[in-house]
Amino acid sequence: MKPMRLHHVGIIMPSMEKAEAFMDQFRLETDYMEYVEAYHAHCLFTKYGKDESPVELIIPTEGVLTEFRNGKGGLHHIAFEVEDVEKARREFEDKGLEMLEKEAVPGAGGIIVNFLRPRYGFGVLVEFVEQKN
């Protein structure tokens, strides 16, 4: 596996209003937002320049993500871009490391994703992203 590039940082927001306040406070602009059914959440990606990475604001509508940090939200994950998410999954599983999903799931903006369980990421939830478009 070749070195990975940081794709984005994911932050859970407890509400759309909090997400808007975060965007205003740090002068961020929306690039796109999409609802991701697999995680029951609106995923908003910020605009970014060449050689920069966006911030993903995750606004869950139901499920386990609504309870993250007792409903307060906060830093959730870092994401690395890989050429092939399934190949990355197989390579990690060959080392005895487990992913959250049995196979990659669709994410926002035409990507597919999977997550390495935090116990294998030294306490960090690590997402792997494959660009499909």
Image (cartoon, grey):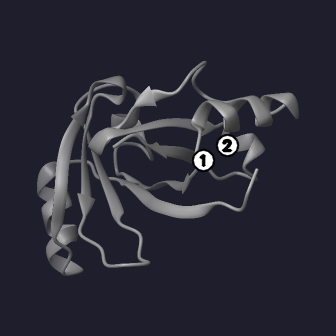
* Whole-percent x, y for residue 11 in the image: 38, 56
Q: Residue furthest right?
A: 95
Instruction: Identify the disc placed on residue 125.
Output: 1
Above or below — where is 2 with respect to 42?
below
Examine the image and state in which quarter residue 55 appears: bottom left
Type of amino acid at the residue the image marks with label 2? Pro
**In the rendering, at what x and y percent does residue 132 appear?**
39, 40
* Residue ID at (60%, 48%): 126
- Residue that sits furthest to the top in the current view: 102
Figure quadrant of the C terminus: top left
Task: Look at label 1 and name its amino acid.
Answer: Leu
Label 2 to label 1, Cα distance in Å?
5 Å
Residue 118's tag is 2
Q: Which of the numbered marks, if any, corresponds to residue 26? A: none
- Residue placed at 34% from the left, 56% from the top? 56
* Residue at image location 36% in from the left, 29% down from the top: 39
> Dot 2 lies on which element?
helix
**Residue nearest the viewer, comparing 93 with 27:** 93
Residue 63 at what x, y percent from top left? 34, 25
Quarter occupied by residue 36:
top left
- In this rendered view, identify the residue nearer to me: 59 or 2: 2
- Badge 2, how many Cα within 10 Å: few under 14, some, many 20+? some
Q: Position of residue 38 (x, y in %)?
A: 36, 24
Horizontal arrangement in the rendering, residue 125 relative to residue 65 (left or right): right
Is 4 displayed left or right of 129 in the figure?
A: right
Kind of element beneath mark 1? loop
Direction from residue 79 to residue 63 in the image, left or right: left
2 or 1: tag closer to the N-terminus: 2
How many badges with numbers are in the image?
2
Pointer 2 with pointer 1, Cβ within 8 A: yes
**Residue farthest along the front direction in this orientation:** 133
